[in-house]
Amino acid sequence: MQWLYDSFLEAKRPTVALSKTLQDLILYTPGPRQTGYAKTIALEAGGEYQVVYPASSTTFTPPNQDNSLLGEFLLQCAKSDHPEVFIASFPKGRFHAGGVILSPDGATVARDLSEDFGRPFSEHFLLNKRIKRPRRVPGPVLFTGVKGASSYYHWLMDELPRVLITPSDFFQTLACSRISGVQAEALQLLPMKGKRLISVDNENGKSSFVADNLISPSYLAETGHPSDRLVQTLKAFVEPLIDRTTRYPEKLYISRRGSGKREIVGNGGLGEELGRRGFTELFLESMSWREQVNAFSHAREIVAAHGAGLANLVFCRNTPLVVELFNSKYVHWCFWKLSSLVGANYLPIATPYGPVSHQAGRSNIEVAPIDVRGLVHYIDKNG
């Protein structure tokens, strides 16, 4: 069947219109039926499993703030367990768009390498679906794709560190989720001479590949639970980008204005008050990666709506004051933990006052005048 598949792909204009059923037979194959652990899959396939860092854990101290409901929520999330970090190899291993690693026979998802947010280990979005027949990629291939790589957070905190911990002589081809914008900027810092780059998250998320030898490192830390080793790895990588001659603003305001979700709204005049105090409003999506890295590296005070751009806190070097604003319907712990790891003085504010949850991720953040007065008083006192 493979020869027929290859012939179909090479044909620019088939002379005979194929029925949908025949096209499906040629182009697709049954998908995985089960999940398993990368170590088991790799060793059974004759591959290798190398531990880079042992398992560890971190317990974070909840920040001081006067919202008891928010404090109780964060206290429940105070401990982060960090599984061991490893690099596994899979002879004839397969990989699929969406950050999925499959066994050589395509029957098993390496679930500890294939994130699927909110699902238990035994479930995965690709199970029991027909998937495209894999295209062969010759030589050793490093695959670091992740679920949700369109989010800056998941690219920076989940995907990029996996590239950084893998020795460059392990692979000839680097298969990334995507190669554009900030991703392309970052890849220019890597020793990639003579290596091939491919983007996996195309074809509407249906791309599938098989490598002569597939190399895949684990996540340096579970999504949303950053570790010190993750922070140090990323800080060391961007050191060549740090500009010590240009003066950058030290007070940053990130409102997410115009983003369409989790924007700071209301009639409290927060932007105006911060402007009078010397804050510069940033629109991270319009900035280069070098500019984002340097903005946070030089910052001493940061006021921001919860959003992926706060992953740049990993680059902070001046133990800044960080104020993160939430809608009470969607509070997340990740940037509290990241702030702690870089030594920042962190204050979370959730509005309106009331029960705190982790449900409505797109809700805007309404800041009332009373919230603004309390916030600027805190900044004046602690900034």
Image (tube, rainbow, N blue to C red):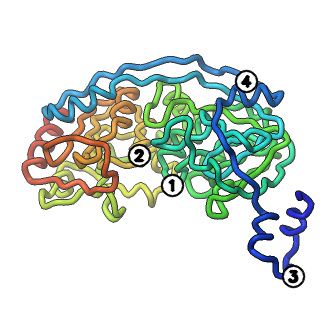
| Residue nearest the viewer, comparing 380 with 194 | 194
**Amino acid type for the residue under numbered disc 4:** Tyr
Question: Can you tell which of label 2 and label 3 is closer to the viewer?
Answer: 3
Residue underneath mark 3: 16
Question: Mark 1 touching mark 4, by CB under 8 A?
Answer: no
Left or right: where 71 falls relative to 119:
left
**Amino acid type for the residue under numbered disc 1:** Ser
The image shows residue 216 at horizontal and vertical percentages of 70, 35
The image shows residue 302 at horizontal and vertical percentages of 30, 43
Question: Can you tell which of label 1 and label 4 is closer to the viewer?
Answer: 4
Left or right: where 287 falls relative to 375:
right
Spatial CA span between label 3 and label 4 = 47 Å
Q: Secondary structure at mark 3?
A: loop
Residue underneath mark 2: 295
Q: Give the mark, 1 or 4, whose residue is nearer the N terminus.
A: 4
Q: Secondary structure at mark 1?
A: loop
Query: Which numbered circle lies on residue 288?
Result: 1
The answer to whether residue 245 is visible is no
The image shows residue 159 at horizontal and vertical percentages of 58, 41
| Residue nearest the viewer, comparing 305 with 298 | 305
Spatial CA span between label 1 and label 2 = 11 Å
Q: Which residue is at 52% across, 48% downward? A: 290
Quadrant location of residue 310? top left
